[in-house]
Amino acid sequence: MGALFSCFQRADDPSLPITFPSSQLDSTLGSDNKGLMNIVKYVPRIFSMFVDTTLDFAWSVMKSSVLVDDRTPIRSGTEGVELLPLVISTITFSLDHIKQIKAKLGGTVNDVITGTIFYGTRLYMQTAATKVHGPNKNRSTALVLLNTRIINTYKTINEMAKPDSESPWGNNFGFLHVAVPKSSTDAEKADPLEFVYKAKEIIKRKRRSLAVILTGRLLETMRKLRGPETTAQYIRSTLNNTSMTISNMIGPMERIALAEHPCTGIYFMVVGVPQSLTITMVSYMGKLRVAVGAERGFIDHKLFNSCLDKAFERIFKAALNTS
């Protein structure tokens, strides 16, 4: 993405740098660590972090090797699904509306959009199961791809090429396995905010865990000791055993241009992966564009997109009605 944005310029003034939304990393232990009382205070949190890290990392390794999701309306389980045709479509949400929901419910923008995706996915699975697959009681897992670079913005190619660069050239990522939440009742009749609260709870707990960092280190160690082919096979197995991938990137805050041609919108898609469903997101000029990559002939992408729209509308309406 750094290489891509190096090709763009600001449409309003090419002499000015492209700016991105701020991204601040939360400290796990906090900034005030003075005195014995603070040590005692943080002991339970350290213990919780250790337990969460152990459980999350162990589950991640198991999901990458032996635990396979069931076949559902979002996972065909077809061998060689990465070679089948893919339908790519996009929908757009207002960041202002997302921030309104966030202000009402607390949490982060990611909590809101992740809850929307989970709710929309469950709505689709219920509808598609009723039409084709029968009752849907199976567990599905989302694989969340995360950038493990400790940076607040993208770096240019020249900056990444420096020997002492804090963000050297090459992929630095880890992944997080997240079980797609189930509603306690029928998805159509469920409280829309239930999925946002569940996403918030899951993400909050996962953020206390170091599993993502350990997964990134595992991939890097595997690449150095056993080579890129073995690492690629491990990543393929990880993708193949799960139901969907979710990945998001921050985009420019102002309009950008390529060769003096203004860009009206941006989206990206991860292709050639052994999954029936891939969801990516990128922010641009106050909008969040969600791209859906769906296995052609298996997933009804129009129905899926309408379920996402319905989920967002219901969450927005419910959030505004909360006191």
Image: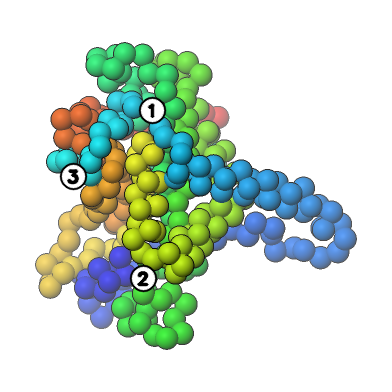
Residue type for callout 1: Asp
User: Going 42% across and 23% down the picture, which residue do you hit?
Assistant: 138
- Kindly indicate the quadrant of the structure image that contains residue 304: top left
| Residue located beneath label 3 in the image | 83
C-alpha gap between disc 3 and disc 1? 20 Å
Kindly identify which numbered label has been placed on residue 170.
Answer: 2
Amino acid type, callout 3 = Leu
Mark 2 is on which residue type? Answer: Gly
Left or right: 130 as drawn, with respect to 89: right
Q: CA distance from mark 3 to mark 2?
A: 25 Å
Residue 272, compared with residue 158, is above or below; it is: above
Q: Position of residue 122 (x, y in %)?
A: 38, 26
Point 53% across, 33% down: residue: 197
Residue in the foreground of this view, choosing between 238 and 2: 238
- In the depicted structure, whether residue 259 falls above or below residue 172: below
Tell me the number on the disc at residue 70.
1
Neighbourhood count class around disc 2 (C-alpha, 10 Å): few under 14, some 14–19, many 20 upward: few
Q: Quadrant of the N terminus?
A: bottom left
Earlier in the chain: of badge 3 and badge 1, it is 1
* Front: mark 1 or 2: 1
Regarding residue 130, the answer to whether it shows in the image is yes
Q: Which badge, 3 or 2, is on the more N-terminal residue?
A: 3
Does 44 sit above or below residue 174? above
